[in-house]
């Protein structure tokens, strides 16, 4: 499909061959969910971990993809046992982080915030600080390697606390301790049902007291109350997924998930608050289908929320488990909802505006990288 001349307001046709060239901003991607299958195998061999479910690249890649396809967040999360198991030493963490930066840059990602839970990487004796230091070193090395082949990327880190555990305050302190060295925020993740974010209030209070931003996985496996708590009690700056904000939106009968114009929607208080406050939604289409948060891409609320002008962003969540990339996620959305480059520029600017780096740095990337990049595609 070739691009047709168009004003900036009319989407110019997306084409799969050019998507790699589109500048992308990734806010929601887990370090331990994005390893190369080959690296999992090699690190397992080096460390003597013998519980991998397959011993060749294709078999292992398929196992992750199929096991994560369970329709249950809890079962989806079980697959991380294997990736976390091989990320217990500083060299392993550095390697995984470096490859992450290189893989994202090769896919056209120009800015990424990569998250992981340091508390899960202590079994071989590393301290929390050593874990974070190794990952940050890896990001620097990977970004340098990417720049050397003409694919510059800026990578920052979010540190995650696991919501079923009791270390969130300590992890928030870790985030603040490393904030001028590459960590730009804090997150909580893990099984949602039975683990409300309000159990971690002291961590969020600590972040707020230190003027440090955070995001919360909310409204993925569990419904609206989780989103309400995350924004109203905890003060989340962004929502991880947030798809269930749809539970607070009534659409006129006959409105379809793929409609280009959505009129007559009635928003409840939570949905209005999220939209009024421009709270960014870190949406991860493929992951949401795998965990059962939505039934299919066709029924994903991304499009309705985008048409209603929520601040939607496109993300990968776990590239290994979903066998995905940012380019693939763009492709899936374009095929399903008919988006053009102007739409993807908007989602990318949404993401860049929502990043946890400082305002002047965000603006620079928007003006010097994102807009010129899309101008080439839009013509
Ligand atoms: O989509 C997710 N929802 C909740 N937790 C998640 C998701 N993807 C990954 N995690 C968990 C598993 C990882 O071990 C942890 C830190 O990256 O975060
Ligand atoms: Zn996630």
Image (cartoon, grey):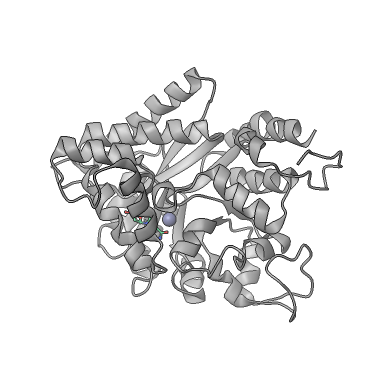
Number of callouts in the render?
A: 0
Instruction: Check the image and report above or below for 199 versus 379.
Output: below
Name the residue rendered at 33%, 29% in the picture: 137
Can residue 238 be seen by looking at this rendering? no
Instruction: Check the image and report above or below for 309 versus 225.
Output: above
Would residue 139 appear left or right of 324 to someone viewing this image? left
Name the residue rendered at 71%, 44% in the picture: 14
Instruction: Check the image and report above or below for 260 versus 58.
Output: below
User: Would you identify the image quadrant in which residue 79 lies?
Assistant: bottom left
Name the residue rendered at 37%, 73% in the picture: 193
Would residue 143 appear left or right of 4 to someone viewing this image? left
Quadrant in which the N terminus is drawn: top right
Return the x and y of residue 198 as percentages of the image width and height: 39, 69
Dividing the image into four equal quarters, which quarter contains ligand 2? bottom left
Quadrant in which the C terminus is drawn: top right
The residue at the far top in this view is: 148
Return the x and y of residue 196 as percentages of the image width and height: 38, 71
Would residue 264 appear left or right of 291 to someone viewing this image? right
């Amino acid at each position: 499909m070739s691009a047709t001349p168009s004003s900036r307001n009319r989407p110019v046709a997306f084409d799969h061959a050019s998507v790699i060239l589109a500048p992308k901003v990734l806010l929601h991607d887990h370090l331990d969910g994005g390893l190369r299958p080959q690296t999992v195998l090699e690190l397992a061999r080096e460390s003597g971990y013998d519980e991998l479910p397959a011993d060749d690249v294709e078999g292992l890649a398929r196992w992750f993809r199929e096991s994560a396809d369970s329709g249950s967040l809890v079962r989806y999360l079980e697959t991380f046992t294997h990736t976390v198991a091989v990320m217990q030493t500083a060299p392993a963490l550095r390697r995984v982080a470096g490859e992450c930066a290189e893989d994202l840059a090769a896919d056209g990602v120009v800015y990424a915030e990569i998250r992981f839970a340091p508390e899960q990487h202590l079994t071989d004796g590393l301290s929390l600080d050593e874990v974070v230091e190794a990952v940050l070193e890896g990001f620097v090395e990977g970004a340098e390697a990417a720049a050397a082949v003409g694919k510059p990327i800026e990578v920052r880190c979010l540190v995650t606390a696991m919501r079923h555990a009791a270390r969130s305050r300590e992890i928030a302190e870790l985030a603040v301790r490393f904030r001028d060295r590459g960590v730009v925020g804090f997150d909580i993740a893990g099984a949602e049902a039975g683990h409300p974010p309000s159990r971690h209030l002291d961590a969020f209070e600590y972040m707020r007291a230190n003027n440090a931003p955070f995001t919360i996985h909310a409204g993925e496996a569990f419904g609206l109350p989780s989103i309400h708590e995350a924004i109203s009690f905890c003060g989340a700056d962004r929502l991880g997924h947030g798809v269930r904000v749809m539970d607070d939106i009534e659409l006129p009968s006959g409105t379809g998930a793929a409609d280009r114009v959505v009129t007559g929607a009635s928003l409840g208080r939570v949905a209005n608050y999220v939209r009024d406050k421009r709270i960014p939604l870190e949406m991860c289409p493929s992951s949401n289908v795998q965990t059962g948060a939505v039934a299919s891409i066709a029924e994903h609320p991304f499009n309705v929320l985008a048409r209603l002008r929520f601040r939607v962003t496109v993300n990968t969540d776990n590239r290994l488990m979903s066998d995905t990339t940012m380019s693939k996620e763009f492709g899936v959305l374009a095929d399903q909802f008919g988006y053009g480059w102007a739409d993807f520029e908007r989602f990318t600017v949404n993401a860049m505006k929502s990043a946890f780096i400082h305002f002047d740095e965000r603006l620079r990337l928007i003006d010097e990288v994102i807009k010129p990049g899309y101008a080439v595609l839009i013509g």
